[in-house]
Image (cartoon, grey):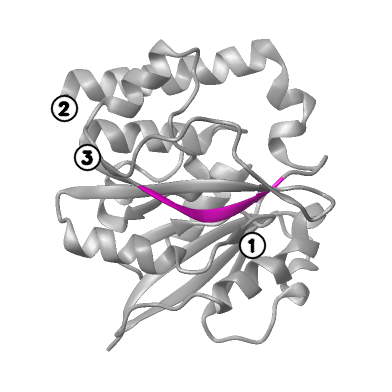
Amino acid sequence: MNRTVSVITPVYAPMASFLQDAYKSLLAQDLPPGWDWEWLVQEDGQDGEIELCLPDDSRIKFGSGRRGGPGVARTVALGRANGEFVKVLDADDQLMPGALSRDIDRLTRSPEVGWTTSRVLDLLQDGSVLSWEHQDPPEGQIPRRQVVDFWMNNEYRLPVHPATLCIRRRLLLALGGWMALPASEDTGLLLAANVLSDGYFISEPGLLYRKWPGQTTMQANFIDKEARDHRNSIVAGRAQALLELFG
């Protein structure tokens, strides 16, 4: 019986048109022998139209429910996941060839590593691709607390991109899934995971991160300083509490 990596994608109506590109990037993945993926597409809402955008593939598991934001949608999808590893894939992004294979290889070879991230390339609206405007760390293991310390000491900037996260399902469940925030829920998860476990940064690009006006990080309620400070306070409080309990 094949081992499984669960790819979780939250989506709502304005992003449905990007699902075909995300699916094509999954089809392009060349997994290690004995492995397969499942794609859990979770609609944040119940519009009844998104499921119609999905191809007929038995590996796709669609779900829907009351709107609660991306963090809630991801966590609801987690309840249907069967894989030992869980990979993040936002609806408007695309996996680079080999991304899942590299994640699986690292997590199977390094039992002390609880999660991986990788380099990101920005996909612009004109189709051009640029490197993420950030200084990536060198390839290698990321010790516990390193991401947390960097984030707290560098104006809440992350040294790695949370949209590339692949994490052991047991660790993800132990952390309660994603934070129930309207945004930054992936940052909160990454920091919490780094409190409890070493990670690993893969220097080869693993994700095409689409830049477009409708993305969450371009919206006024994400950029607003008061709202951002409030989210960061919650994220920091959770990380600090975990450090006090388990650090």
* Magenta-drawn segment: 202-210
Percent of width and height locating residue 203: 40, 48
**Mark carried by residue 197:** 3
Residue at image location 44% in from the left, 75% down from the top: 37
Q: Is residue 129 left or right of residue 244?
A: right
Residue 73's tag is: none
* Tag of residue 246: 2
Q: Position of residue 147 (x, y in %)?
A: 34, 28
Query: Depth check: 43 or 7 in front?
Result: 7
Q: Position of residue 103 (x, y in %)?
A: 35, 60
Answer whether residue 134 is visible to the viewer in this image: yes
Residue 13 painted magenta: no
User: Per the image, is 205 magenta?
Assistant: yes
Q: Which residue is mark 1?
A: 64
Query: Which residue is nearer to you in this view: 61 or 39?
Result: 39
Give amino acid for label 2.
Phe
